[in-house]
Image: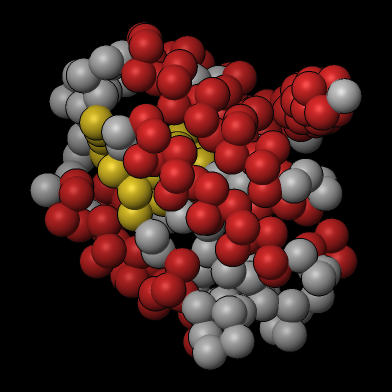
Amino acid sequence: MKRIAMMAVMALLCLVAVGQANQDPYYARRATLFDELPIGKKDIVMLGNSLTDGCEFNELLGNRHIKNRGIVGDIVQGLIDRIDPIIKGQPRKLFIMSGVNDISHDVDADSIARAMEKLIVMVKKGSPRTKIYLQSLLPFNNDVREWKLLKGREHVVVEANLLFEQVARRQGVQWINLYPLFADENGRLRADLTNDGLHLMGKGYLIWRDAIWPYVK
């Protein structure tokens, strides 16, 4: 019964990802652009959702080989659906952050972690020399702005991060726990790092940069 429920959840995620590509013009523009832009063996790919999309990582980290492959609103299944061009390029490194949009779709932590592990297995199989870095989910702060689809779901971020760490250990990839760097004493995204409770201001990206710098260089 549990297996049937899991299959139903994954099928729903697939439909959501397809719906994003078909209904959201921005998502479609980014996804089809990424299909055309080449990835090389010297490249470092940043893969994720709006948090990744919103940063100029190549400038922030001073590395022209960094390629941003973030899209606003993406979910883990969306990353799976568009991973092929990245695998084809056999990049040197791949940094992954995704899952908060899955939470807003009422997906539980276990299902998110299973999808993330599927993505990592695909990359390992298709591009075995790529060094994979799995980054934790960041907290959000509904006191700055209310995100109704995330209301009362702060605990899912914590649960997903615990499972992500297990996935990283099981798959032999590098785990980067960013969560403590961004959380206040109540486990919310620090108000000084955001203007909407979910996305980062420049100061927040500097913290992210400093955290991943040792792995990028």
Q: Quadrant of residue 107?
A: top right
Query: As displayed, is residue 12 above or below residue 58?
Result: above
Instruction: Name the spot of residue 93 as percent of width and height, x first.
Output: 25, 32
Of residues 30 and 73, the one drawn nearer to the viewer in this rendering = 73
Judging depth in this view, the residue of 3 and 74 nearest the camera is 3
Horizontally, residue 66 falls left or right of residue 120, namely left
In the picture, residue 172 is in which quadrant? top left
**Rendered view: 205 above or below 48:** below
In the rendered image, which quarter is residue 151 located in? bottom right
Q: Position of residue 149 (x, y in %)?
A: 84, 60
For the question of whether residue 34 can be seen, the reply is: no
Residue at the left extreme of this rendering: 217
Decide if residue 213 is on the left or right side of residue 165: left
Is residue 10 or residue 20 the one in the foreground?
A: 10
Q: What x and y, as percent, mark residue 78? A: 64, 29
Q: Does 27 sit above or below residue 125?
A: below
What residue is at 34 percent from the left and 49 percent from the top? 175
Tell me if residue 206 comes above or below residue 67 in the rendering.
below
Q: Residue at x 12, y 48 (%)?
A: 217
